[in-house]
Image (tube, coloured by chain):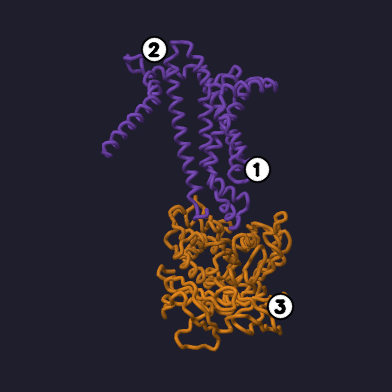
Chain colours: A purple, B orange
Amino acid sequence: MTALRRLLGSGWLSAYAFLYVVFLYLPVIFLPIFSINTAATPKFPLSGYTLKWYEDLPRTPALLDAAWNSLVVGVSASILATVFGILAARSITRYRYPGRRAINGLIMAPLVLPEVIVAISMLLVMLQLGLSLSLFTVVLGHVLVCIPYSMTVLTSGFEGFDRSLEEASADLGESAFGTFRRVTLPMVSPAIISSLLVCFTISLDEFIIAFFLTGTDATLPIYIWGQLRFASKLPGVLALGTLLLVASFLLMTVAEILRRRAAGRTQNEGGLYA
Amino acid sequence: MPEQSQAARPHQSERPPLSERPMIEIRNVTRSYGAFKALDDATLTIREGEFFSLLGPSGCGKTTLLRMIAGFDNPTTGSIAVGGQPMEGIPANRRPTNMVFQSYAIFPHLNVEQNVAYGLKRLKLQGTEEKRRVEEALEQVSLTGLGKRLATELSGGQRQRVALARALVMRPKVLLLDEPLSALDKKLREQMQVELRRLQQAVGITFVLVTHDQYEALAMSDRIAVMFGGKIAQVASPKEIYQRPVNRQVADFLGGMNFVKAEIVEENGASLVLDTLGFGRVKADKPKAFVRNGEAATLGIRPERLRVLWDNATAKFEVAGKVVERHYFGEITHLIVEIPGLEKPLSVTETNDFGADDIPVGTSIRLAYDPEALVAMAD
């Protein structure tokens, strides 16, 4: 009786889990499928296999410009967000002071604020400050949305970093800089690299803030948005989308592996009192 | 250090006489945090080659003192010298001390060998000298052959040994140990006590151990400083600390003690004559730091120094009373014995080889004691 119920129960749960995953990923699967279809309109049945949409991509100067812009914005935003993230995460994990939780909450808040509202407010501030819209303003916007992600990754890397490790290094004769180089940095570097990768991915895929804050320079998502107006350009967008998808997936996977390695290093340490 | 070497506790008496030369001189050291004094005017001399313990409950200032010797904290006032050299203004990385941390602080990104060699790297030793010293240190702590293991692959006891080797390989003048055994289970802890003691005698370095475990301190140390509330209450050998505590607090912290109210009849030089209700008139040694507080004093006797007198046996010194409680502990039994005239019943620890575990509650018994075991304390 109980065995039957368990089977039935797990059967329903399995079906639910299966449908859930299909719902999440089926639309995404269509992207690569239609990107290698010969027909320009995305519909079944598929008319044939081709890589010409991919071959056309490097021959589109506007796309190359957008890709370059995205790279510049992504690298700048990820470095800045990670630097700020390191400072904040170190302070949150290392020191105890009044308002620590509140500050942590405020730093994490952009994660749940409606992005379109953030984008509009930032636009207003930038204009009030007299900044002309450019890739620079996009970087500023992206730093804001990247910091919570950077914080999450770095906090899990720094958390449980046993302070006595740095003291032990000093005790064994190492200078403050030597301690940073030989102990602190090797222990937190996986978390830092992970944070850079996550921030780069977020920035690469971000549309709303870039759309509001950019001047005439398009980033990749803005370029894609622009191309959607032309039905004939759709296969190219699908091909580009597929590449972005693969890149994001790879970057996030590497980032997660590094984050876990960093967290494992600092946390499985010492005896009961570590 | 083989696994089966759980033999007897190390014998202090086998120890060659200690050098009287001071290694660490702590002079009037106070560490304040605002109005709170973590350490209050501590003065202490630790001798060369000595196994010295700082013993006390948590918050007594023992760890603060150890961290100031290591250079992780600085005295608010007062001075510390190590090996005759004042330590003021000298940071931790340039002090002739090394520390074994409570959490061991093994570098998780390095293997055992690299951990042990960490401090040697800066010394830039010639040729194979570094390798030789690492191997020697690993051998000292019985970790030969485990050099390539990562910290995450080691047991708690092995991590402890790595931390020891990593500090000893630096050949410090003083090895500081911050509650090194507290994270280990009871059996391993007792085994490590013996090993630490042997290691200290083998290397001859001054060891300063911080602990809240009185048995640990008694078993390993040449001398102990008992601390309470930032102050050093008594500095003496384990035997003296246990048998001749200077006050009730010290007596209590080091195990069970029966306290009996006493009245000072006569005070001369090194001894006191006291009147008590249960034990009559007693002559006792005057404790070193005895400060007379009117006529009142306290007389103490350890529960194991009271023996049950069987049948018609007699003793020169005895008290009579009635068993009111009996608690069985395997090899021993605790008897609570009410003595006419005493405000509190006496606690008696008796081994079970003569049947103390069978004495019914309510039995009238007589207890023998040695007047030497009575200790006078300031109130």
**B216 or A73, which is in the foreground?**
B216
The amino acid beneath tag 1 is Pro
Residue nearest the observer in this picture, B65 or B319: B319
Q: Are the residues under badges 1 and 2 in a single subunit?
A: yes
Which of pointers 1 and 3 indicates the residue nearer the eye?
3
- Residue nearest the viewer, comparing B213 with B348: B348
Instruction: Give me the C-alpha separation between circle 1 and circle 2.
Output: 59 Å
Determine the secondary structure under disc 2.
loop
- Residue B225 visible? The answer is no
Q: Nearer the viewer, residue A253 or A117?
A: A117
Task: State if disc 2 and disc 1 touch (CB < 8 Å).
Answer: no
What is the number of the mark on residue B212?
none
- Dot 1 or dot 2, earlier in sequence: 2
Residue highlighted by disc 2: A41
Specify the quadrant that holds the C terminus of chain B. bottom right
**CA distance for labels 1 and 3:** 52 Å
Q: Residue at 68% across / 83% down in the picture?
A: B270
Amino acid type indicated by mark 3:
Glu
Whether residue B318 sits left or right of residue A40 in the image: it is: right
Q: Name the spot of residue A77 as percent of width and height, x first.
A: 58, 30
What amino acid does circle 2 point to? Answer: Thr
